[in-house]
Image: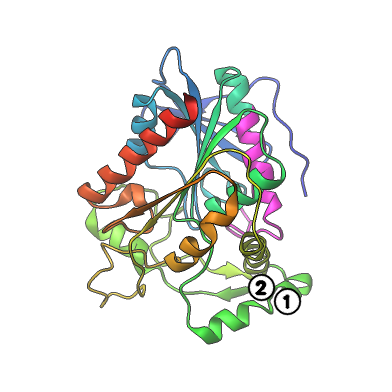
Amino acid sequence: MDPVSVPAKLEWRDDVLPGYEHAPVSGATLVRRRDNPSTPRAIALHVHGYNDHFFQTHLADAFAAAGCAFYAVDMRRAGRSLRPGERAHHIADIAELGADITAAAAAATADAGDLPLVVHAHSTGGLAAAVWADRTPSPNLAGLILNSPLFGLRLPRWKQMAIYGMPTVSRFRAEQVVVPAPSHYTQSLVSAGRWPFDVAWKKPEGQPATAGWLGATLRARQAVARGLDIEVPVLVARSDSCGPDRPDNPRRDSQDVVVDTDKIAAYAKGLGSDVEELVVEGGIHDLSLSADGPREVYLDAVAAFVDRVLR
């Protein structure tokens, strides 16, 4: 694993998103909102999921309205950090993503000042952030928000069983593609047209998973199932239901079609001693991209949680 290193001076460049800029940080990319509060009370760091990158500017606006200097990290081999010849999103251990969170948090703190840190993490990023917060959290971490964390996959039983062989396969053929499934979820986001994103970084046709990624996330999910000991308050948010990721699912725009929400419910209380659960009726996988009503419920709860941990 590459060592975590933070440049003495961040080299900010104009970002693809108007009003944002980005800088390389230890193999990852840190993105910041230019119009951050002049006297922020905290730092908010967004961590994306699989087949994903940062584009949710309305989420950044919500954190800024809550008094936070907003940053996001595009992790190694993803989005702004993907380099030619790399296998997108491939990892061999969840700690690789934890190292990117550490580097991004340190760089954001150096840039904004020694402030409390709130990490907002989605899906695979939520899984990685939970393990990171248990094992190697940043010293200024004040709260953790998990947006539909990947604690379980919605797959047929035979595929679930096949995944248990991935740690062995990954030792010999880590970059072997084993799940080339399409993403009807991402296609529906494109069709809705509400959230413009780069389709080279968040592919509507889906991003094939490697044996390494499957093995790494399986081991991390098993660690979550055994229980963690996160010492800061945690908000665990999920949709009120999950269903199949198929075009003929009539509720694909009002439920989670990616992760198993029952697993989130089962494992949430085992994350630490201060866990708040949020169930969003009609929410989709990325709760911040839900329809107006569920999205407002989610963002209001996020703001309330930030107020609570910063009191």
- Give yes or no for contact between labels 1 and 2 (Cβ–Cβ under 8 Å): yes
- Mark 2 Cα shell of 10 Å, populated few (<14), some (14-19), many (≥20): some
Provide the residue span drawn in magenta: 84-106
Q: Nearer the viewer, residue 307 or 34?
A: 307
Q: Amino acid at mark 2?
A: Gln
Residue drawn 50% across the image and 53% down it: 49
Q: Is residue 137 above or below residue 255?
A: above
Mark 1 to mark 2 CA distance (whole Å): 9 Å
Check residue 97 for magenta coloring: yes
Residue ID for mark 1:
169
Q: Nearer the viewer, residue 236 or 57?
A: 236
Q: Is residue 226 above or below residue 117?
A: below
Residue 252 shows in the view:
yes
The location of residue 66, given as percent across then percent down, is 37, 26
Residue 99, by quadrant, is top right
Q: Is residue 214 above or below residue 14?
A: below
Residue ID for mark 2:
176
Q: Mark 1 or mark 2, which has the lower sequence index? A: 1
Q: Nearer the viewer, residue 157 or 247?
A: 157
The location of residue 85, given as percent across then percent down, is 64, 57
The location of residue 146, given as percent across then percent down, is 48, 48
Q: Residue furthest top?
A: 39
